[in-house]
Image (spheres, rainbow, N blue to C red):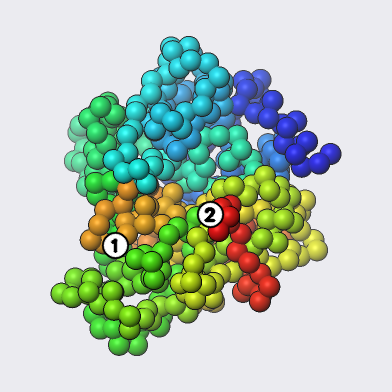
Amino acid sequence: MGVRDTVRSHWATLGTKSDSKPVVPTTIGSGRNVSTAAPVAATAPVYSPFKVVKSVIFDGDSRQPDMFELNDVLSDPSLNEVWLFSFGFQINLIMSPIKDHVKVHIVGQLNTINSEQPISHYANLKVHRVDIPSPWGCHHSKIIFSFHQNGTMRMHVPSFNLSREEMNLVQQTVWTSPLLYEKSETVPKKKSRFEDELLEYLNSYSSYTSLYGLIASLKRYKWHVLDEQNCQFVYSTPYNGGLTQLKSCLRASGMKLHGDEEDDDLSFVNLFIQVSSMGNPFRKKFDLLQDVMIPYLYTDWFEKDGYDKKLKSKEYTTPFLAHSTLVWPTKTEIKECMTQGLSANWFFYKRSEQTERKVVPCLRKHVPLPTNATQSDKNRHMVPSHTKYYIQFTDENTLKRPDWILLTSHNLSQAAWGPSPLKKPTNYECGILYTTTMGRNKVRLTLASAQQPPGRTIGSRVPEDITVLPTVKVVTPYPLKFQRYSATDEPYTSVVQ
């Protein structure tokens, strides 16, 4: 059976009510996602908030405990209310597994809602309309808030929009919060930067979107458990956020800024980036990442008089070019991966003179799989990922021990981040940032691929300092081995240039 036939054969069964009992996430202690697979000597907690999203195309129909399935959230018998933020909604996919008593709220642009039935057909569904001020912007944020009958809740930040195609034809990841409990009136409230940033983001929506009920509900919960993991909420809106808010989060983590353009330490800045869209260049001759984003995040240059004028100078060059790694599918990878052109339309790359000069040297592709790879890994090999990861590491040998890591909806575009720190974004975007330090808190970040050789498990080798620092385990859907583009490789784009 060909790939297209396989896809068609599964579409009819996706998003329908299932007779199988949903798996309800278990909790330990205070409700944190704590792994018990640590060695006997370990005393510090290990958090595993990231999961790869299961695809029936790559992984088959059988249950995969280590993977995320949307139905497990929507068909949970304890679910009482759910809020869904997205760029696309297939209403049948969402409503089929949900019980009739569950209150369902979807937040997005009206033209991104696809329903076979009139919305009025669903008595328990309410649409919260989002309008975008700019014709070049969109509501690109993806969040799920699930409230349960026992008073607990979870927050999920998926990389996918709410469609069958996105969950099954491209590789996806999801972040899930610990199980959150309501605050006690008898216990002093603990401050939470995560909560403050999340509420600032939600309060940026127009009054007619009517998020007041959601905001009031979220204020009841103990968000400080995420601050204890050095977790922050990153966002963009047409009114605030973007690069300035990301920098604020990094500053809160104690990240050092460089004040001198000749500073030798600039050579130690390394970024790993994997996105699904790289948009228009900045001011037609500069690259958003190299010339604006990195200098702004890592220096105080934009705070100096005349830096904007300097950007316009023909002599301006960035010192960061050689230290960025951009994972991007080649035309050959798209052609040879299991889903081929079926997964191609999500990936847009704007080709120009400056991208050839500044971006192409940073592009990386996947290396061949080992001969003992599992069938699921073989199915997923070279299939492009719709995830968006931004990761800082000290050098190429420490990628698996990052300094900070961001899983987000932000693509590498001016609409997502803002064309400069002096101008606002045009999109709604959001993501989850982990840093190794934040105030007095310190955690250890580990980065691993969900694709592991047979017989091995993620994190099976535990460094000695695990007994000292809490560990947050971050997972990617693809192997963390890459190689430079060859002279004949071309970056894939879904748009004819």
Q: Amino acid at mark 1?
A: Ser
Amino acid type of the residue that numbered disc 2 sits on in the rendered structure: Phe
- Is residue 340 shown to the viewer in this render? yes
Name the residue located 76 percent from the left edge and 42 percent from the top edge. 3
Cα–Cα gap, marks 1 and 2: 21 Å
Q: How many residues crowd around disc 2 within 10 Å: few (fewer than 14), some, or many (20 or more)?
A: some
- Asked if one can make out residue 481 in the rendered structure from this viewpoint, the answer is no
Whether residue 204 is situated above or below residue 353 in the rendered picture: above
* Foreground residue among 123 and 343: 343
**Whether residue 137 is situated above or below residue 364 in the rendered picture:** above
Quickly name the residue at label 2.
348
| Residue at the spot of label 1 | 420
- Residue at image location 64% in from the left, 40% down from the top: 168
Instruction: Describe the element under mark 2 as helix, strand or loop.
Output: strand
Residue 191 position, x and y percent, is: 22, 47
In the displayed orientation, state which residue is furthest to the right: 1
Please tell me in which quadrant of the rendered image residue 244 appears.
bottom left
Q: Mark 1 or mark 2: name the one nearer the start of the chain.
A: 2
Percent across and percent down for residue 329 are 61, 60
Frontmost residue, 347 versus 1: 347
**Residue 451 relative to residue 285: left or right:** right
